[in-house]
Image (cartoon, grey):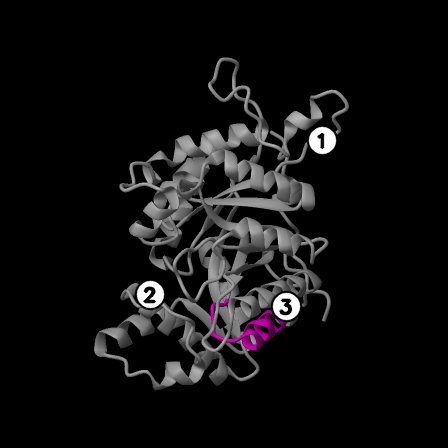
């Protein structure tokens, strides 16, 4: 079976990287900084990623989190499309239960028109927030629809993107625009491309569904590392060839930060660890500064949480980070790595991606 998305999914690693390297960004807002500054850093990072040969650049959907400015991936991606030329852009992900499938099809149809042939639609089944916020997003007092309806919602979204509801279906005469319908009306010259659909997950549900549907799969190793290998095995065992892929394609998100001074790398990643600690204990806020993270009085349970969190972050010198990433690829057998660095300031993040690119001999040095 032909792999019709070979050019958009599979990429030849550049330099000496064992697999393609990509970037996941959350437009994190550090203490003393604004959302405008954070989003400006996201643009700078996307440009850097394109210049240095990273394969794709994704942004994530989160809500009601002061330290994360990426509540609307489609809006951010439209802005990034105007500031980049080649790199693949996508969502990591759009949380499908929060949105009507037609709305997503329209938004990503617009993105495909703005950046033809380089848009990924990564979909998650979690709300990307707490239950009360999810209910507010969906204008429901109770969440009567959600993760359990994900396969049905995914099928509906795919039908809208392909504009192929069967005759007699209640949506057969409804079209997502921009979309294929524009190529079928008189004078239509619509491109055949549509966004590449990925399934995202942090457990086995989406892994198995992606395999059964023959879709590429992205696993959130950066916050669910204990489930990484079992989920990847489930995906590969469940995989059925499709019109999209003839063999499995899996990538994982990984927290990684390189610095010129390994001690500074640890200072920086501690800011992300403290931010996650506060989030998990119901105290979400801005990303703390390195000084604040060092001064914080950690209780015993908090120390254990931070130590456990840092065990799953690859950090240190550029060479140490490269060794850690190579080991992760060897252990998991993934086809691609998506690196994220949720730390306080822009300088550390931008420098890290430069150092990692240097360590792997990516172009643009």
Q: Are marks 1 and 3 in contact (CB under 8 Å)?
A: no
Of marks 1 and 3, the one in the foreground: 1
The residue identified by callout 1 is: 190
Disc 1 crowd rating (10 Å Cα; few below 14, some 14-19, many 20+) is: some
Of marks 2 and 3, the one in the foreground: 2
The residue identified by callout 2 is: 279
Nearer the N terminus, badge 2 or badge 1?
A: 1
The residue identified by callout 3 is: 357
- Quadrant location, the N terminus: top right
Q: CA distance from mark 2 to mark 1?
A: 45 Å
In what element is the residue under mark 1?
Answer: loop
User: Number of callouts in the render?
Assistant: 3
Specify the quadrant of the image occupied by residue 277.
Answer: bottom left
Query: Position of 169 compared to 311: left or right?
Result: right
Query: Position of 264 compared to 187: left or right?
Result: left
Chain part drawn in magenta? 341-356
């Amino acid at each position: 079976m032909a792999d019709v998305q070979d050019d958009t999914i599979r990429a030849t690693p550049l330099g000496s990287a064992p697999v393609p390297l990509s970037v996941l960004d959350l437009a994190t807002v550090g203490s003393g900084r604004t959302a405008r500054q954070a989003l400006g850093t996201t643009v700078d990072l996307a440009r850097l990623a394109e210049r240095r040969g990273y394969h794709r650049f994704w942004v994530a959907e989160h809500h009601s989190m002061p330290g994360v400015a990426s509540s609307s991936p489609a809006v951010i991606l439209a802005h990034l499309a105007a500031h980049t030329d080649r790199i693949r852009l996508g969502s990591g992900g759009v949380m499908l239960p929060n949105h009507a499938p037609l709305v997503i099809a329209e938004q990503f149809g617009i993105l495909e028109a703005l950046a033809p042939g380089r848009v990924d639609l990564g979909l998650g089944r979690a709300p990307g927030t707490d239950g009360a916020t999810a209910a507010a997003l969906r204008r429901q007092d109770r969440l009567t629809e959600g993760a359990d309806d994900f396969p049905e919602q995914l099928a509906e979204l795919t039908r809208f993107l392909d504009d192929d509801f069967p005759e007699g279906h209640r949506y057969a005469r409804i079209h997502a625009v921009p979309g294929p319908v524009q190529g079928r009306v008189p004078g239509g010259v619509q491109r055949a491309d549509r966004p590449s659909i990925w399934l995202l997950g942090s457990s086995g549900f989406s892994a198995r569904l992606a395999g059964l549907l023959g879709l590429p799969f992205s696993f959130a190793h950066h916050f669910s590392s204990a489930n990484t290998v079992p989920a990847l095995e489930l995906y590969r065992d469940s995989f059925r060839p499709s019109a999209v892929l003839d063999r499995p394609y899996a990538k994982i998100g990984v927290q990684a930060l390189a610095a010129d001074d390994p001690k500074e790398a640890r200072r920086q990643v501690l800011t992300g660890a403290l931010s996650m600690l506060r989030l998990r204990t119901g105290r979400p806020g801005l990303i703390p500064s390195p000084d604040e993270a060092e001064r914080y009085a950690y209780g015993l349970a908090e120390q254990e949480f931070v130590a456990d969190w840092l065990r799953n972050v690859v950090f240190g010198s550029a060479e140490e980070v490269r060794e850690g990433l190579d080991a992760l690829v060897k252990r998991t057998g993934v086809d691609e790595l998506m690196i994220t660095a949720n730390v306080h300031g822009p300088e550390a993040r931008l420098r890290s991606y430069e150092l990692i690119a240097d360590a792997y001999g990516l172009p643009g040095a």
